[in-house]
Amino acid sequence: MAPTNWWLTFIIALVPLLVGAVWYGPLFGKLWQRESGVTDEQMENANMVKIFGLTYLYSFLVSMFLMMVVIHQFGLSGMFGMLPEWNDAGSVLWQDLSSLDEKYGMFTRHLHFGHGALHGGMFGLVFVGGIISINGLFERKSWKYMLLHTGYWFVVLALVGGLLCQFMKLPLPM
């Protein structure tokens, strides 16, 4: 199952750039520079086209992966996608899945902003924050440094997860 709205994914992939412009700019820009050891001279001499271009590419990939984390209906294709009946809307499989949907709302129950924000934020805090902290400990970075980046990813992934759950529609053969 892939998203049906690629343009939405391209737009949502802008969220890390937009949040980063505020987070690492007016909110915590000086703190970030101090804690990461980036000088004003390094900032002035940076290849911003390369940095923003690659950031957008990676943000798109993060958004594509996060979709599988926050939209639980992706799990259906993992469980049933290999069956020939998967692509046949009139099959017994889809009759059974549709019955479950009528009874429990399994196709729509968790497709709202709050659900995606909860799972995206948790992923940012626990998974991404854990990785940042492990690297920070070995690199002898400060806790401010680790909290700064973990906070950024918490906010970004909560927003991306919320937007994906709210607006992304999956191609279910119903």
Image (cartoon, rainbow, N blue to C red):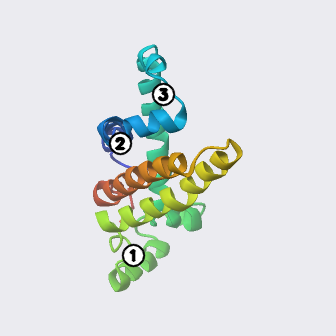
Disc nearest the viewer among 3 and 1 = 3
Give percent across and percent down for residue 33: 46, 33
Q: Which residue is mark 3?
A: 54
71 and 135: which is toward the camera: 135
Q: Residues within 10 Å of mark 3 (few under 14, many from 20)?
A: few
Return the mark for residue 23. Answer: 2
Could you tell me residue 105's position as x and y percent? 34, 78
**Distance from label 3 to label 2 (Cα)?**
18 Å
* Label drawn at residue 106: 1
Q: Amino acid at mark 3?
A: Leu
Q: At x 54% / y 49%, what residue is drawn?
A: 146
Q: Is residue 78 toward the left or the right of residue 1 in the image? A: right
Give the residue at the far bottom of this rendering. Answer: 103
Asked if one can make out residue 1 in the rendered structure from this viewpoint, the answer is no
The mark closer to the camera, 1 or 2, is 2
Q: Is residue 135 left or right of residue 158?
A: right
The Cα–Cα distance between marks 3 and 1, rounded to whole angstroms, is: 36 Å
| In the rendered image, the vertical position of residue 139 relative to residue 76, given as above or below | above
Q: CA distance from mark 1 to mark 2?
A: 36 Å
